[in-house]
Image (spheres, rainbow, N blue to C red):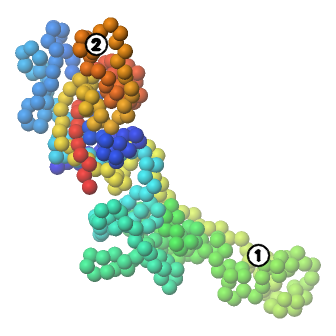
Amino acid sequence: MTERPILFSGPMVRALLDGSKTQTRRVIKPQPENDPRKHHPIVPYHNGQGGWNWVLAATGHGTGDPFTCPYGQPGDRLWVKHAANLFPVYFKPISGWEGIYAAGTDGVIYRMDRGDPKPLTPSPNSKGYHTVCLSRGARETHAVHRLVCESFYGPPPTPGAQVRHLDCDRANSTPANLDWGTHADNWQDRKGHGGGMGEAHHAAKLDGAAVAEIRSSALSQRDLARKFGVSQATVSDARLGKTWGEHQCGERNEKPFSLWKSPIHMPRWASRILLEITDVRVERLQDISEADAQAEGTKPIPDPCDHVRLSCADIGCSGPQPYRVGFRSLWQEINGPDSWDTDPWVWVVTFRRTP
C-alpha cells in the first residue's frame, strides 16, 4: 500500500466530508496521439499488471510504452490537500505518542485514538502552567506548553532550553505564542510585559505616582528621599531610569508557526481526510454517466428538455441530466471554458473515505 497526496478544492472537500463525492477525474498527461495514418483511433488497454497501454482500436497493436496511474492502484491511499481555512483546528502528532495524542493548532492536547479527536482538560500546576495526563497504562503528567512547543518547533535546541510564552499568559499555549528560549529570555519577556516590575516587584518601595513626582520635581535628592521615606540611591535610580524603566520583550528565536498559504504546501501531518482507492479506469471525459457525475460530488444544474416536435425517444436523448451539466460546469470553471469540448482522456479514480 502506498500513500500519495491529492489536491481538492474547498467545495470538493466538503463533498468528501458529507459522503457525496466518491470519484475524481484527472486529465492523463501526456495525452496520446492518434496513429499517423489518421484512421486508427487510439484507445487504452489494461495490461493486467497494474498499468495501461495505448493501442490502435482497429488492430489492438500497442503504440507506446506502458503507463500507470500517478494516483495509485486499488488498495493505495490518498491524503487530501486543501486550503487551510476549511477546519478550525489541525492536529500534529506528539513525538512518542503518535496515533494516541496530538497537539492542536489551538494549543490544546487531544486524544486521537477514540473516534473524533477529544480535547484533554488541563489542570494548572503550582506555577500556573497547564498540565495534562497522558496514558498508555501508566499515567504521565506533562506540561501542555512543552508538548505543543516540541510538536511544532522540534526538540529543545540546547540543554536546559525553556519554553517562552511570548504574551506571558501561561494559559495561552497556541504555537504562534510559544518559542524556545533561555531563562534570560523568559525574564526579559516578563519585564517587557511589566511582570515583576514597578509596583509588582516584591521589593518595590515606590508607586507609579511617586516615581512620576520624583522625575518632575525640582526638589533635591535628599528632600525627596526624606519625603517618600526611601534612600537617596532609590530616588537616584528612579530619576535616571535604572529602575521603573521601559523594557522590551526579546526577539523570537524560532520562525513562528503559521498554517500553509497555498494548498500545495499543506503538510502530511495536517491532513484530516484519507481516501482508499477502490477502482481505477481510463475513459473520455464526456463519457461520464449521470450516476458518475453525481458520484463526483457536483451540484445538479437543471437541464430541462425543450424538444418541440420530437420526443426524447425519437432523437435518442436520455432526458435531463442535471448532474452531468453540473459536472461540466465545474470542470470548465477549473480547467477553462474549452476544456470540456476537447474531451480528453482522463483517469477515473473511485475511492472511499477511511476512518
Q: Looking at the image, which residue is at 31% across and 18% down?
A: 342
329 versus 107 height, above or below: above
Q: Assess disc 2: are there few (<14), some (14-19) or many (≥20) residues with their C-alpha within 10 Å of its C-alpha.
A: few
Q: Position of residue 27 (x, y in %)?
A: 28, 29
Looking at the rendering, which quadrant does residue 63 occupy?
A: top left
Mark seen at residue 75? none
Q: Is residue 182 left or right of residue 351?
A: right
36 versus 247 height, above or below: above
Q: Assess disc 1: are there few (<14), some (14-19) or many (≥20) residues with their C-alpha within 10 Å of its C-alpha.
A: few
Looking at the rendering, which quadrant does residue 270 occupy?
A: bottom left
19 versus 208 height, above or below: above
Looking at the rendering, which quadrant does residue 28 occupy?
A: top left
Residue that mark 1 sits on: 241
Residue that mark 2 sits on: 311
Q: Looking at the image, which residue is at 50% across and 61% down?
A: 176
Give yes or no for contact between labels 2 and 1 (Cβ–Cβ under 8 Å): no
Nearer the observer: mark 2 or 1; the answer is: 2
Q: Position of residue 199 (x, y in %)?
A: 72, 82
Which secondary structure lies at badge 1?
loop
Outermost residue to the right:
218
Which secondary structure lies at badge 2?
loop
Q: Position of residue 46 (x, y in %)?
A: 11, 30
Nearer the N terminus, badge 2 or badge 1? Answer: 1
Q: Looking at the image, which residue is at 31% across and 25% down?
A: 321
Q: Looking at the image, which residue is at 65% across and 80% down?
A: 196
Q: Could you tell me the amino acid type at mark 1?
A: Gly
Asked if one can make out residue 40 in the rendered structure from this viewpoint, the answer is: yes
Q: Could you tell me the amino acid type at mark 2?
A: Ser
Asked if one can make out residue 70 in the rendered structure from this viewpoint, the answer is: no
Q: Is residue 112 left or right of residue 39?
A: right
